[in-house]
Image (cartoon, rainbow, N blue to C red):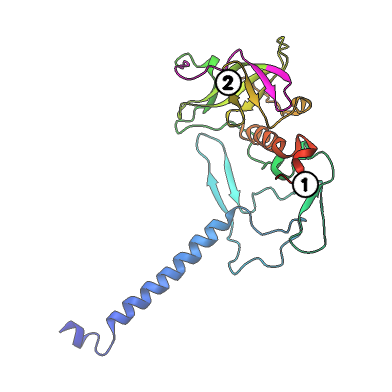
Amino acid sequence: MVGTEFFGNFDLASAAIWGFWIFFALLVFYLQTENMREGYPLETDDGAPAPNQGPFPVPKDKTFVLPHGRGEVTVPSGQHPDRPVLALQRTSKAAGSPYVPTGDPMMDGVGPASWAPRRDVPELDAHGHVKIKPMTSLPDFAFSAGTDPRGKPVVTGDGEVVGRVIDMWVDVPEQLVRYLTMDVNPEGSGQTRLIPINFARIKSDRVVVRSLYAHNIAGIPGIKNSEEVTLLEEEKVMAYFGGGTLYADPARIEPQI
């Protein structure tokens, strides 16, 4: 018999289970190192290399060819190595102490107003087409349900009227509204800014943006192209509105009961 003559006293079941555990350990090692292609090596809050980098080594460089002719990306060395000095100060020397802004947090991009340096190109769908577009450039799209925000005044958290909605930006493949276009002058100055739809509350007679106050409107990051918005521009706009939920009014920073 094969089990007696070929293997002899060799325990085939034991070999199988040990082979499985070795394979499983190698798989965990591979998946963990592949997961470390972004955000590594680790840094402290001050930007210095972290003393404890973990048990797994940073993987070797791998180059990914991006679709639709958008070049190549090499990670982990292709990450953004130059970290800007953030306008933050630690409240105590103890590790884990919170940081407080030292300047204008809304403009410095810290705390809830922080943003990541994403690529300054529009997001594309699976077919290589720009994913988010204004509705005025989409003849096949029309508003069909709910309250149409176009033409309604925009009211900030302090009750001031700061503009009016003139258009909506649609995620074409998802068929969702992502942004509202606001003319920052109710009289129609032509200067526009984007409002993320999740920060807007559409009422019957107005659009309310509670995260910002009137004096914050001028600081909303703009976009270069009226027909498309890049990933970096989206990141900055969302971060600005998110930062307003805490920094628009100094009273918001105080403890809330």
> Is 36 on the left or on the right of 162, as rendered?
left
Give residue 222's position: percent from left, percent from top. Answer: 70, 26
Give residue 26's position: percent from left, percent from top. Answer: 46, 68
Give residue 5's position: percent from left, percent from top. Answer: 19, 87
Which quarter of the figure has residue 104?
top right
Point out the residue furthest to the bottom here: 9
Q: Which residue is mark 1?
A: 84
> Is 210 on the left or on the right of 26, as rendered?
right
Q: Which residue is mark 2?
A: 203
Residue drawn at (62%, 15%) of the image: 152
Which quarter of the figure has residue 204?
top right
Q: CA distance from mark 1 to mark 2?
A: 40 Å
Residue 105 versus residue 223: which sits nearer the camera? Answer: 105
> Is 233 on the left or on the right of 70, as rendered?
right
Residue drawn at (61%, 27%) of the image: 200
Residue drawn at (75%, 39%) of the image: 252
Point out the residue furthest to the front here: 257
Our reading of the magenta stretch's main secondary structure is: loop
The magenta stretch is 141-163
Residue 76 versus residue 181: which sits nearer the camera? Answer: 181
